[in-house]
Image (cartoon, rainbow, N blue to C red):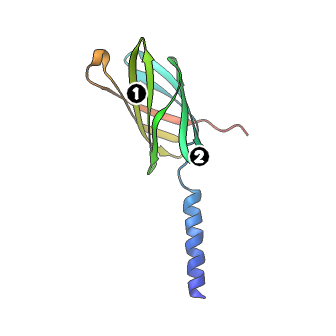
Amino acid sequence: MKMLRLLCSFLALAAAVSALAADPTGTWKWTTQSPNGEISTTLKLESKDGKLTGAYSNAFGDTVISAVSFQQEILAFEVVRDLGGNKFVVKYRGKLEGDTIKGTLEAAGPDGGEAMKLDWNATRTPTQG
């Protein structure tokens, strides 16, 4: 009987942990302070076939994200843009804590100079019910 109770307790704990697992899906919004001013951004993350995918939108247009990973509550992804024939990659990395993601982004510096690192703090928008 003790073994059965122990097994039931273990299964209940496992179910609770899985229910509390971090879920990055949803719509996220933030404003980045860049050398050229504020850039308002929206990211829509969803899970398809067990993989995260996303659509990214700001004043420079809409695009899909690439190189997406989510491990131990750390979200990482890249945004690749073609600006005037030049490929421009912005790398995002941040920690998910409830309905916020706090991290840094890294982009090539002006004229190929030293990379810029900026903070980004996203908030998940409430779902429409």
Image quarter (top left, top right, bottom left or bottom right) of the N terminus: bottom right
What residue is shown with label 2? 49
Q: Secondary structure at mark 1?
A: strand
Q: Tag 2's secondary structure?
A: loop
Q: Are marks 2 and 1 in contact (CB under 8 Å)?
A: no
Q: Amino acid at mark 2?
A: Asp
Residue at horizontal 56 percent and vertical 85 percent from the top: 3
**Residue beneath the point at 50% across and 34% down:** 122
Q: Is residue 17 left or right of residue 77?
A: right
The picture places residue 44, in percent across and down from the top left corner, at 57, 33
Q: CA distance from mark 2 to mark 1?
A: 25 Å
Percent coordinates x, y for residue 118 in the rendering: 37, 28
Q: Which residue is mark 1?
A: 90
Quadrant where the C terminus sits is: top right
x, y percent for residue 33: 42, 23
In front of the other: 101 or 66 = 66
Q: To which quarter of the image does residue 67 belong?
A: top left
